[in-house]
Amino acid sequence: MAEIGKPVSRIDGRLKVTGGAKYAAEFNQVNMAYAFPVRSTIAKGTITATDTSAAEASSGVLAVITHKNAAKLNAINPQEQWKAGIVFLGEDLPPLQDDKVYYFGQFVACVVAETYEQARSAAALLKVTYAVEKPRIDLKSELPNGYRPEKLFGEEAQINTGKTAAVLAAAAQKIEHTYTTSTENHHPMEPHASIAVWEAADKLTIYDATQGVLVTRAIAAYFLNLKPENVRVISPYVGGGFGSKGAWLHLVLAAMAARVVKRPVKLAVTRQMMATNVGRRSATIQKIALGAGFDGKLAAIRHESETYTNLSQFFEPSGLQTKVLYAAPIREITYKVAKLNVGTPTFMRAPGETPGTFALESAMDEMAYEMKIDPLEFRVSNHAAVDPMTEHPFSGNNLLECYRTGAEKFGWSNRKMQPRQTRSGRNLIGYGMATATYPAGRSSATVRVQVLINGDVKVMTAAADIGTGTYTVIAQTAADALGLPVQRIAVELGDSNLPTAPFAGGSQTTASVHPAVLAACEMLRESLMGLATTDAKSKLSGRRAEEIAYGDGKFFVRSDRSKTDSYADIMRRNSKVMMEACTTTKPVTDGGLGSPVAPCMVAPAASEENSDAKKYSFHSFGAQFAEVWIDEDLGTIRVKRFTSVQDVGRIMNEKTARSQIIGGVIFGLGAALMEATEHDHRWANPVTRTLADYHVPVNMDVPEIDVHFINKPDPHISSIGARGIGEIGITGVSAAVANAVFNATGKRIRDLPLSPDKLL
């Protein structure tokens, strides 16, 4: 493979820096109107009256939609939604269907006007009266009324309840501590937006900022009672998703508004609405207990996780990594969930593993310190060679190599066991590390590839590029499979009219789509070769396939490279201006975030390289190392260096992969040091509602981030051997930083973010 693995620059990069890449809000339509949602000013209660007169009289207003005049949508019905292809939904709350309010900021009306400014101005004139009820806002006080979920992603949520008590009590060494993490809000660079265009009474086109055009199509079709084939969703570029884009119903509200005014309508979510209406990572309270023998071997792990939800079955699954890390003979993982009147939690980059690794990896550091063992060696000695829950071998596990490489690159041997031993002036210096992990998902996917007589190739699939480099890596895969330069490959993504592909979530796009790209290109190449070897006019006539190689847009005889036949000449002689192949690839265990029906030939695959979850456990692993400097007088924490080593299978593009890990680490630094959503407990409104007060890392907060890959193909996940990379980079980051803070100061902080007040 000549192109796969190379640090190829993004083929869409020029479009992005010149403004040529169009995002959802930029597909402006002729005669387009603008919708602006009105949000509730209470967190719980009932709407008793809505005075729309001033808004309706305002300049440019075309319509004011409330629960009293809104079109009726199909009701929430999980079984029917699943049948319709809605694999998940942000919240179980179709817009403007009744008078109930469940959280502050809930959409309770919508103003449609000629301009955005007119719609927003008129929305402020709407007067909504409520019968107010006391909201449930505090996690700790509501947990006694919480529930214990039975299922988590289709599996048992409560694992070995109560079964570790005796083992922990008898353990020679044990610790038990509580770790807490804050609510974090989704703030991708591009806020959510939708443009709805009714092409006919029963035919709808939506331009939407979504991680999955097919899921978005299913949502629109279900709630608006349309045939899926009559809904088209277009989303060629997405300015960051991270789990938040594609499952929220403002797109349905835009379609409702467009139907009322009989014009295209744009609905753009504001940055303030991002704090209430598009999901967040919920706060967690996690209790970790570890028991070990004098030999340093873990005897038991207990991980109790408490969190909240609202209008959804989703809750932060913080015990996921505890199922796969470390070789304790028994582990207990339990959940308790409270229901609060705050914005609905949802998936957020590495949901579960991000707060979960903070708790587990902090506890591992604490246990190592208590036992006077180097925390890296403690992890090595408790390394799980097989999946502790299923006892299946991992499809690929080079975690020990990650530890070794990371320790060498970072200079871990310079770390001193006792805290407060290293300083520079008034700065205390500390080293910390943690394990990273994330599951390796794969779903079925379909790809159509066309080669034109001029040698250009087009690759088409409904997959999304959410800023990760999917366009580029698909082009590299096709270029290798067809023996063409990347510059000759055009990639079309993000359109529900294209061949089916899964939602871009769970770090599964690479593992799902690229086997289909490879299979379709191979099929097309074989078709071209078949034409050549059966053509008397070809220099390849009568040759067997194993005698022929390919490259530079032509075939040639391996033993005599002068005997060639170009793709263009083969097509010209056979009177073809275009040839195509359409192929679907499916893992044996067809799970993941959506498994679309295959409209094309299903490509055969060797059983050992086809994601059989009954034989193998599919996970990626890594090691995170942090150096922090802490001003002893001010308590300010600066991460000075960070090393991340990842085992994620084959690296498809070293440059985009490195960017993904750097982005994940920065995301983790935000969680570790500053991100927190604060609510006014009187009204349950978020007071950290913009990027002015919800702090995220900026350039001055980000150190040099040294990234390394093991780069060993996973032989069992697919023919490509690559696992997803988008989410593992954040896991373990906050624990590595917190452990470094302890090493620097001797003070253990078990509550994120690690703000200066907690050190002083």
Image (cartoon, rainbow, N blue to C red):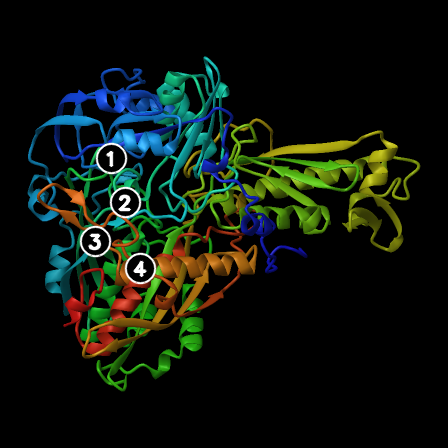
N-terminal of the pair, mark 4 or mark 3, is 3
Q: CA distance from mark 4 to mark 1?
A: 27 Å
Q: Tell me what residue is drawn at x 47 percent, y 33 percent.
A: 213
Query: Which amino acid is tagged 2?
Result: Arg
Dot 3: what SS? loop
Q: Provide the residue designation for mark 4.
A: 670
N-terminal of the pair, mark 3 or mark 2, is 3
Name the residue nearer the viewer: 608 or 374: 374
Q: CA distance from mark 4 to mark 2?
A: 14 Å
Q: Nearer the viewer, mark 1 or mark 3?
A: 3
Q: Is residue 5 left or right of residue 324?
A: right
Query: Which amino acid is tagged 1?
Result: Gln
Q: Which mark is residue 182?
A: 3
Q: Is residue 34 depicted above or below 407 in this figure?
A: above
Q: Provide the residue designation for mark 1.
A: 313
Place of residue 502 in the rendered image (x, y in percent of width and height, measured from the top left): 47, 36
Query: Which amino acid is tagged 3?
Result: Ser
- Which quarter shows the N terminus? bottom right
